[in-house]
Amino acid sequence: MDTNRLQNLKNQAISNILETKNEQELEELRIEYLGRHGQITRLLKEIPSLSPEQKKDKGNLINETKKIIEETIISQKNNFHQKNNREEWFDITIPGEKPAKGHLHLITAAIEEITDIFKKIGFYRVAYPEVEWDWYAFEGLNMPKNHPARDEWETFFIENLNHPKYGEAVLTTHTSSGQLREMQRLGKPPIRMLDIAKCYRRQIDASHAPMFYQFEGLVVDQGINITHLKGTLDFFVKQYFGPQREVRIRPFHFQFTEPSFEVDVSCIVCGGRGCKVCKQGWMELGGAGMVHPTVLKNGGFDPNKYTGFAFGWGVERVLMMKYKIDDIRLLFNGDLRFLEQF
Amino acid sequence: MNIFILDSWLREHLQTKATPKQIGEYLSLCSQSVEKVTKIEDDWLYEIEITTNRPDCLSVYGLARELAVILPRFGLPAKLKSLEISQPVKTPDKKNLPLEVKIKDASLCPRFTAVIFDKVVIKPSPKIIQERLEKSGIRALNNVVDISNYLMLELGQPMHTFDYDKIKGAKMILRESAGGEKITTLDDQIRPLPDGTIIIEDGEGRIIDLCGIMGGKNSEVDEKTKKVLLFVQTYDPVRIRQACQKLAFRTEAASRFEKGVDPEGVLIAMGKAMEMFEKNCEAEIASQLIDIYPNPPQEKKVKLDINLVNKIMGIEISKKEIVNILESLGFVLETNQSSLMTVTVPHWRYDDISIPEDLIEEIARIYGYHRLPTNLPPMAVVSQNKIDFPKWEAKIKTALKFWGFTETVNYSMVSESILKNVEIKPEECLRIANPLSDEWVFLRPSLVPSLLQVASLNKKENLKIFELANVYLFQSENQLPEENLMLTGLVSGESFAKVKGVVESLLEELGIKEIEIKPYQLQKTFYGKIFHPSRRAEIIFKNNSLGIFGQLKKEKIFVFDLDFTQIVKDTNEIKKYQAIPKYPPIIEDLSFVIPEKTYVGEIMKAIKTTSLIIQRVELIDSFEDSRTFRVTYQDTKKTLTDEEVEKIRKSIIDNLKNKLRLKLKGKGEN
């Protein structure tokens, strides 16, 4: 076949390809030219029998023709696709098939949030026994037997457990028992404790469940003072409740801190103007104070050398404030209609 | 303890132009928490929470004394008016009515005062007294009873009145009760007296007073009373408190006595009362004032170092300011050039102030906590625990959440019936001595009963729930129980394999691979009783049991119960890098006919261990007695040839045939 005919073949093929109207016609042409017995394939098979000179010229030409035909077929195919894609109707509003997803309990979410906030300022998370000796829960915290301060905690007692030195066993009423445990664990400063654990008190109503969680902070070191406590509370409140929240500390009384404080946050409902939910614009968050020298001593620390602060608040209390949940019992009654909202 | 204070009454003792709102706010900031300020008619009522260490604030006068110090700090002038007391002592007279008093033990009653009035006219109190009492939440009864209530609110000193003629033999013996005595109190209740309760008996041995708590019915002042014995005392707070606890009964007077009433305030109250009896009851004083006060407290001094004040407050505060604050609160100071000072505690703060830190609290609160700056504590490296439980807990909970599980948090205390439901013996569980209700009596030794309860409560198909919490296991009488973290899940509407897959993936997330799954054989344990006898399995890792999973006997519910404490000990965070294979794998499917009761796990294990070249064995199809496995052969050092693979394949087939009597079904396609 001479070069002219080859040229014609090429032109013919290109125009045929461009005239095809669908993929099937195109496929037929592909087979006609490039199939196992196609025109171009046949020509390619002849190349080995050509003279060396022809091989070079014609061979190149044949290969080039093949390449052009192939490219034209591909480009025509793309044309069809684009056109098809443009014309196809597709419903993008069908519901997505989501991967399985469950729900973390609100308390877990709150605990993780609280942990992250305190982690940023160097607190280390621990947990201590829920069934605890009287000494850790009360006596070692400067609350001797029969002290009226014990009345603040409605305590559950456990039958048939008694320690010769530490007294009877209770369900711990607060994470403050962890203060003595952490002091004993470390034996020396620094302490930057965040203790989050279950606590128990013998009471039930919309804002009290017999089981609840507390988070307790304890910092003991040289030179710790009230301004450090204020800074820590302020950091937490602004991170957890939002930067517009204000904090204040007021005098209060606990046997295991001196001075003792009550911590208030500006009301998240009214913003501090005063409303039904709050007290004159403030909501009580919980207690705090400078660790009492007796408690430091009981924990094995020299109160003349070291000072510290502590605070202990209810996890449910802060999350109920944040999510405006009005009954604590919802958190523990296992109703999936509630649990699956979060 | 919350008290109600009327604004107009407060201003009778405090001269100030501060508004009720200002009083409420500043008292909260520097002293006692004002919960509410409410307008009643043309007056205001403060509801104030008084902390247990400040019984001196449980009165109108006590709060006026605080405010006289606090308000000027906010630029509001305020002055405490002095209590005008007429000297209560009446000269002895032959017509004096007698009263013989015997106190068995001086520690019961640190100060005992009493006086008798004659010609008492019982009638309603003057209007202002009635109104003040009613607005403060106490019912006005008659002029005599009202005086004691009025002065309790005004001065914080509870008092009691008797009908003198009802005290037999004009004799009183104050002692501790013993041997199961009884008293009928003013509220007509017969109260059996716990031993050690402070009481008074009269000349005929009748018990006429439950001291500090409530008077006896038999000596009550009534409309016919002519002679009144007025009683103003202080009692041992501990005995009052114990009596209240044992009696499960508390009165306003008892709440004050158990916190401690200032014995130095007794005569002031007595003087005021005598004035009021004369004025409101037309009474005549008919006896000498009896005042038994054998051991007045010693002066109390506390040494204070200014450096410590600054150290705790975190600011530099001048000596002059410290002195000003303490003196304004009634402390008496001895100072010199050094940083040390000696501080004498005023009698009304006697019990509360004992150590320098107590004084620092006084200085700091009056200075104003709101004026202190905020600082973060310096960062420090804290010695860490070996296992970071919170990290693993968070990781596993999050994984379960994204696998479709919902987390529940259930009470640690459970009822007898839910334990019995799962055949746990209540007598083996820790028991609460004073449970709140039948629902919460035992500390749960397993989370399974709680999850079953949640399941039955929700009546939902395709349930996937879990809980991660402590269980409590008795160890010995003088040891705390073992608190073991368990991870327990409950699944309905799924297959055994799906639940097993969850357990396997969970462990893989924690880096625990190559676990062994064994049939759980024990019958008599709690697991043995609740799980289906054959559809249950134990998970073993390095010879330790990590827990159990399987189907329950009663329903098609699956449960996994994993020992999280043990699992976390076995976690392995180290991931090993393996070079990506350079040579292609050969993958083929082999189908076998298996004899009955052949564990597929054993087959796969047998295939896998045939040669190191076998990288993976998967079960891809199960139908009747046929099982198809996909086997991946790969050599890290070279491209495998057909001949090499054929050799391994042959030994797989021979192996399975000889050991497990499996027959090859004809080679599958790859």
Image: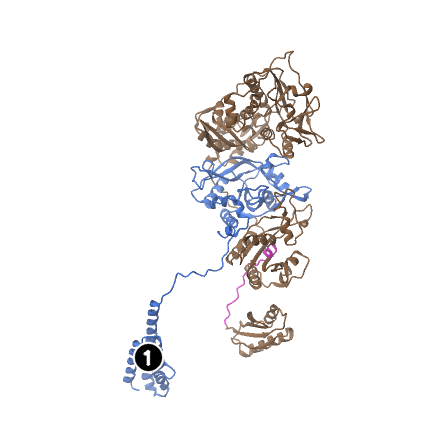
Chain colours: A blue, B brown
Q: Residues within 10 Å of mark 1 (few under 14, many from 20)?
A: few
Q: Residue at x 51, y 58 (%)?
A: B404
**Which residue is tagged 1?**
A64
Secondary structure state at the residue bearing disc 1 = helix
Q: Please tell me in which quadrant of the rendered image residue A205 appears.
A: top right
Quadrant of the drawing holding the N terminus of chain B: top right
Q: Residue furthest right?
A: B179
In terms of depth relative to the viewer, which is nearer, A155 or A196?
A155
Q: Is residue B160 magenta?
A: no
Chain at numbered mark 1:
A
At which x and y percent is residue A115? 51, 48
Compared with B96, B496 (above or below) is below
At which x and y percent is residue B112? 63, 22
At which x and y percent is residue B107? 66, 27
Compared with B446, B135 (above or below) is above
At which x and y percent is residue B648? 58, 76
In terms of depth relative to the viewer, which is nearer, B635 or B512?
B512
Q: Please tell me in which quadrant of the rendered image residue A160 appears.
A: top right
Q: Is residue B574 magenta?
A: yes
Does residue B321 appear anywhere in the picture? yes
Magenta residues span: B561-582
Residue type marked 1: Glu
Q: Please tell me in which quadrant of the rendered image residue A36 appears.
A: bottom left
Q: Residue furthest front?
A: B224
